[in-house]
Image (cartoon, grey):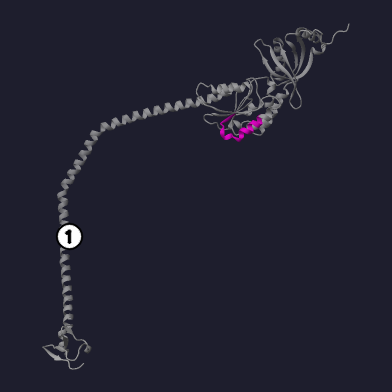
Amino acid sequence: MQQPSLFTPLPQGMTLSEFNARIEGHLNGQADIQGQWVIAECSDMRLNRSGHCYTELIEKDDQGTTIARIGAAIWAGTYRILYEKFLNSTGQVLVTGMKVLVNVSASFHRLYGIKVVINDIDPSYTMGDMVRQRQEILKRLSEENLIDRNKQLPWPEVPLRIAIVSAAGAAGYGDFMNQIQGNPYGLQFYTCLFQAVMQGAQTVPTVKAALDRINQYADLFDCVVIIRGGGATSELNSFDNYELASCVATFPLPVIVGIGHERDETVLDYVAAVRVKTPTAAAEWLIQRGTNALAHLDELQDAVVTAVRETVSQAREHLAYFASMIPATARRIIDTNRVRLNNYASSIPFAATGLIATQRTRLDRAGERIGESVMRTLQREQQRLQALDDKATLLSPLNTLRRGYALVRTGDQCVTSASQLQPGDNITIHFATGTTTATVNNS
């Protein structure tokens, strides 16, 4: 009788456990999935308390896109042997990002699904593509002097205006906002979300686009926070990108990166001003910056209060000292001025006598000068009066009459022209000695 194929449905249907049992029966024990050497890259490698190592084996194409993935385990006993073997051969420990050649076996359990167990490792495969590419990018950034460029930007004393690059619904963004807004110190942060895809092929272009938008309003922000929640390390491949790292390194604002867990590192972690483990840690870093500023303000307040108290205390001491010195100083000033006053009083008679003698001499000299001046003035005026007298005598009408002239008057008027007289007018003629009257006969 022909056996039904793996996916031949039963008419009545089957239970999931029956279906898984069929898969288990077909896979388990197959030689082609037991003890096979597989080339893959370790991603999200972690060690639990029991010593078992869990990881993901991934394969990427030439563009860096993950095209295959499967979970794998190295049991504790095997892991201790492989760890020493790999370390002794390569000088490095087995970590996330290494490309490895491993011997694996696969089995299927109807409850837990498919399981890949790593049995052995070939140490000739050392660094995986992720680490190699990361080193090449970091080397290029270092040669271009970009590694520390963003770290050298100055920080404001309290960065409160924060531009956030994240996915709106991401748990990491929610954790960051809860931490920032619920800080117990009452710090008020201004936040603005610039959305981007934080995993997959769209991560690089959308994060760069978000940074470009922030750059247009750079004067409105103090810093940039790029955050993303946890997840597999393989999902962080997009952050090992030269263009994105160069954009962060040359950004005009300090950048905080919190895009993975403590065990994860990307190129962005090397070029950012601050690298923290998680979005919550990014919020705590900013809050700590604010609390440091508050503490500094408290220190300044205490210093001011102390300085004021010391100043007041010193001023009181000085005031008390000066107050105690006032009576003695006043007495000394009074005594000094009393002596000076007595000296002035005793010197007044001598000074007055000398001054009076000096002024008397000046007065005598002034009197002599006045007398001399008066005599000169009298002589000058006498001479002037004599000259006037001579002139008056010379110009006297009497002297004119004595020279043979006569003065003719008609009534009260002096006659100076014949036209003033008419026939029959009576005139009086004055001579130097005596007068006579006459009548005008004709004109």
Q: Which residue is mark 1?
A: 362
Q: Is residue 244 above or below residue 27?
A: below
Q: Position of residue 74 (x, y in %)?
A: 71, 12
Q: Position of residue 215 (x, y in %)?
A: 61, 34
Q: Is 25 included in the stretch rendered in magenta?
A: no
- Specify the segment rendered in magenta: 207-224
Q: Confirm whether residue 334 shows in the render.
A: yes
Q: Is residue 22 above or below residue 232?
A: above
Q: Is residue 313 above or below residue 263?
A: below
Q: Quadrant of residue 381?
A: bottom left
Q: Position of residue 214 (x, y in %)?
A: 61, 32
Q: Main secondary structure of the magenta part?
A: helix
* Disc 1, SS: helix
| Residue at 29 percent of width and 30 percent of height | 320
Q: Quadrant of the N terminus?
A: top right
Q: Quadrant of the C terminus?
A: bottom left
**Disc 1 crowd, CA 10 A, few/some/many (<14, 14-19, 20+):** few
For residue 52, side relative to residue 26 (left or right) = left
Q: How many marks?
A: 1
Q: Nearer the viewer, residue 401 or 324?
A: 401
Q: Position of residue 254 (x, y in %)?
A: 59, 31
Amino acid beneath label 1: Arg
Outermost residue toward the bottom in this view: 441
Q: Confirm whether residue 250 shows in the render.
A: no
For residue 41, side relative to residue 341 (left or right) = right
Q: Nearer the viewer, residue 328 or 175?
A: 175
Outermost residue toward the front in this view: 424
Q: Is residue 7 above or below residue 333?
A: above
Q: Is 223 included in the stretch rendered in magenta?
A: yes
